[in-house]
Amino acid sequence: YLSGAGVALKIAQALLDYPAPEFTALAAIGTVADLVSLTNENRAIVQQGIKVMNNHPSVAIEALLSQAGYNDAINEETIGFIIGPRLNAVGRLDDASLAAELLMCESAEEAEFLAEQVEHFNQERKDIVQEIAD
């Protein structure tokens, strides 16, 4: 089964002559973050999205990875353990619109500002988990 992000990508591909490559990157993030099986079409979406993120990362992805102190190539683990948890933390603790705003951002300066806020929510999420575990 496709993730919701995969379905959204398929709709964009059907409606647009040439959907932006960033759509594939976003679908890859959603696919990995939703923990769907990485077989068949899901695998293709993730592979294509990772290629886009490594070759032409958006200002949002660059800012998120910068806040996390991550400098290596992007792979499934990067999405699953760095990008996905940070974006999901915002929606778990507050309104997810901050994460959406970051992902749609085109200005590097604005992306860095928004990514700092996302990082704050991620740290808060980690603190809550640690408190529960103690």
Image (cartoon, rainbow, N blue to C red):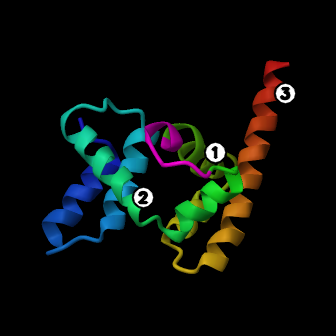
Q: In this view, does 42 lie to the left or right of 53?
A: left
The answer to whether residue 106 shows anywhere in this view is yes
Q: Nearer the viewer, mark 1 or mark 3?
A: 3
* Mark 2 surroundings: few (<14), some (14-19) or many (≥20) residues within 10 A: many
Q: Is residue 126 left or right of residue 55?
A: right
The answer to whether residue 97 shows anywhere in this view is no
**Amino acid type at image mark 1:** Arg
- Disc sitting over residue 53 in the figure: 2
**Amino acid type at image mark 3:** Glu
**Amino acid type at image mark 2:** Met
- Disc sitting over residue 131 in the figure: 3
Residue 106 at x, y percent in the picture: 52, 79
Question: Circles 1 and 3: CB distance less than 8 Å?
Answer: no
Q: Is residue 81 left or right of residue 38?
A: right
Q: Give me the residue at 24% from left, 31% from top.
A: 39
What is the CA distance from the residue labelled 1 to the residue labelled 2?
A: 25 Å
* Mark 3 surroundings: few (<14), some (14-19) or many (≥20) residues within 10 A: few
* Mark 1 surroundings: few (<14), some (14-19) or many (≥20) residues within 10 A: few
Q: In which quarter of the image is residue 34?
A: top left
Q: Give me the residue at 23% from left, 35% from top.
A: 1
Q: Is residue 81 above or below residue 10?
A: above
Q: Nearer the viewer, mark 2 or mark 3?
A: 2
Magenta extent:
71-79
- Disc sitting over residue 92 in the figure: 1
